[in-house]
Image (tube, rainbow, N blue to C red):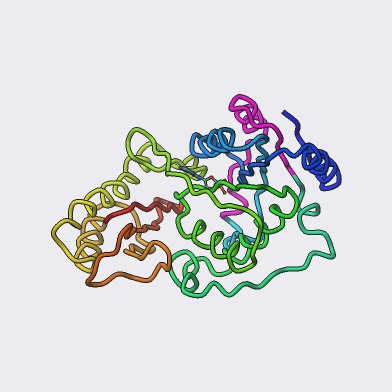
Amino acid sequence: MQVIQSVNSLKETITSLKAENKSIGFVPTMGALHLGHTSLIEKAKKECDIVISSIFVNPTQFNNPDDLAKYPRTLESDLSELEKVGCDIVFTPTKEEIYPSDFIEIHLDLGTLKGVMEDALRPGHFHGVVNVVKRLFELTQPKKAYFGLKDFQQVAVIKFMVKEMNLPVEIISCPTVREKSGLAMSSRNMRLNEQEKKDALIIYNTLMQAVENAKIHTPKEVKKLAIENFNQGNLKIEYIELVHPLTLETLENKWVEDATMCIAAFCGEVRLIDNMQIF
Ligand code: AMP
């Protein structure tokens, strides 16, 4: 496995891979890797000649400086996990490599995806995500890029950007990998103590209950029941929404195929998100 830090050596490597006509699969990450991340690498390996992963804790997508400071950084074990799973190239740039002084930001109007859920609660987050992902796509030139549905709104935003900007990459969305308990794997789970890990299961339980409730209730009723159930636990809700899978518009009285419930909540000091296809 090749570890590349500089943009210049990445460019050289990409040029020679392109000359050999190799298809590139790309998996962007912020490190602190777990089985959710490696599932993306495994899928990319099946579909592409060469898999590139990046590890970059992107400061511009953190709206909370404390969250950025406390974000887990575990580079050595990340590299050994990536090696084990057969990743070919890991790009570990510095902030300066990603954002040189002549970096030109893009400002994308996210349409119906803006002002809701993560965008409402984390202003500027998706602006940071869109810019870093576009930059990483330009640098790695992938045929396909792999994203986890754990970050449901992020997948919608990236697909929207690719379509709007006509970028030559196919976005592959991959299922959420969970602990046996049902807790969605997340780098932030490292910050939970044992009690908090138990408390956090209210998220999965609420989503599973919503799947059952959807069989006999309207979306509006399912959301109300979900909030009631959630509030019996110890987490602090940021939002529980039932949305259209593509436009993210709130569902009220009518179900649509792949209607998705999204939850964000604080478990102690740690902000967790999860979602599930409900209908
Ligand atoms: P992050 O390092 O949190 O930026 O995540 C990098 C990629 O891994 C994103 O596409 C995430 O959606 C994906 N990811 C994170 N957690 C999971 C999970 N539990 N299952 C599947 N994909 C995940």
Nearest to the observer: residue 25 or residue 78: 25
Residue 94 at what x, y percent from top left? 77, 48
**Residue placed at 52% from the left, 48% from the top?**
172
Q: Please provide the residue range marked out in magenta.
A: 67-92
The quadrant of the image that shows the N terminus is: top right
Q: Is residue 11 left or right of residue 67?
A: right
Does the magenta-highlighted stretch encompass residue 252?
no
Residue 233 at what x, y percent from top left? 26, 52
Q: Is residue 24 left or right of residue 242?
A: right
Q: Is residue 212 above or below residue 75?
A: below
Does the magenta-highlighted stretch encompass residue 80?
yes
Numbered disc total: 0
Q: Is residue 205 above or below residue 105?
A: above
**Residue placed at 60% from the left, 61% from the top?**
162
Q: Residue furthest front?
A: 21
Q: Quadrant of residue 84?
A: top right
Q: Is residue 66 left or right of residue 202?
A: right
Residue 206 at what x, y percent from top left? 26, 52
Q: Quadrant of residue 63?
A: bottom right
Residue 130 at what x, y percent from top left? 62, 62
Q: Is residue 9 above or below residue 88?
A: below
Q: Residue furthest left?
A: 216
The quadrant of the image that shows the C terminus is: bottom left
Q: Quadrant of residue 85?
A: top right
**Residue placed at 64% from the left, 67% from the top?**
165
Q: Is residue 64 left or right of residue 264?
A: right
